[in-house]
Image (cartoon, helix red, strand yellow):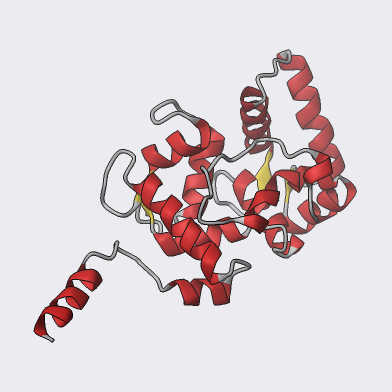
Amino acid sequence: MRSIANCFCLSKANKAPGFEEHAILASETNFNVNEVEALYILFEQLSSSIVDDGQIHKEEFLLALFNCSSKKNILAERLFELFDLKRNGVIEFGEFVRSLNIFHPDAPEADKIAFAFRLYDLRHTGYIEREELKEMVLATLHESELSLSNDDIEAIVDKTLQEADLKGDGKIDPEEWKELVAKYPSLIKNMTLPYLREITLAFPSFVMETEVPDSELVC
């Protein structure tokens, strides 16, 4: 009996920092318990790819998403900040599951719109300002391996801001962002990853596609 108790204590001690019960995470997200278990296996792989401490560090996150651990990538770094809900420099398992839930096909569209807004709000001001918009356009072009002249980029930024900035104050607030997304739903198409609906224990790898084919998009 004592050996069984010791094994139980050892199992509890080996749980990663910030570990949360799978049933609780399933009750709070669109994932079922089996899917949460599959995500935990994936999480263990990612959290041990560079530093084996049961937490995903920025370098591990960048390596998983964009195959880069040191190269500066605004989009990847911003995503890491948003996944790091506790803002302690690492992603714990509960944060990983709750953040991925935003990308689930069954997640509310309002949550996807809000997350995308925060993604663009690089300076945490509650607004998307012109420079932030330009930085994200440049990052998107870079990830898509597209090249445009500076004049073309400025034109895209100006046109977007002109159309979205309904109040004419030079920035986009959350309500204006909602209006823009309603007009151009493709702005949040990357916020839905169809394969999250069918996660199994054989879930292969975590690859954040920069483009989701419209034929696979589930809204």
- Of all residues, the one furthest to the bottom in this rendering is 1
| Left or right of 148, for residue 77 | left
- In this view of the protein, can residue 105 be seen by the observer? yes
Front-lying residue, 47 or 123: 47
Task: Left or right? Give the position of 199 relative to 177.
Answer: left
Q: Is residue 149 above or below residue 175?
A: above
**Residue found at x 45% / y 71%:** 22
Image: 134 above or below 81: above
Look at 37% across and 37% down and name the residue there: 59
On screen, residue 8 above or below 144: below
The residue sitting at 47% across, 49% down in the picture is 81
Residue 68 quadrant? top left
Residue extending furthest toward the top: 149
Residue occupying the far right of the picture: 183
Query: Quadrant of the rendered structure where residue 69 is?
Result: top left
Q: Position of residue 141 (x, y in %)?
A: 67, 25
The answer to whether residue 193 is seen in the rendering is: no
Q: Position of residue 57 (x, y in %)?
A: 35, 45
Nearest the viewer among 20 and 177 is: 20
Locate residue 207 relative to residue 145 in the image: left or right.
left
Q: Quadrant of residue 32?
A: bottom right
Q: Quadrant of the C terminus?
A: bottom right
Number of dots carrying numbers: 0
- Depth order, front residue of 69/12: 12
**In the displayed structure image, the side of residue 176 where residue 90 appears, left or right:** left
Position of the N terminus by quadrant: bottom left
Q: Where is residue 132 drawn, in percent x and y?
A: 63, 37
Residue 193 drawn at (x, y percent): 67, 49
Residue at the image point whose x is 81% and y is 36% from the top? 160
Furthest toward the left, the residue is 2
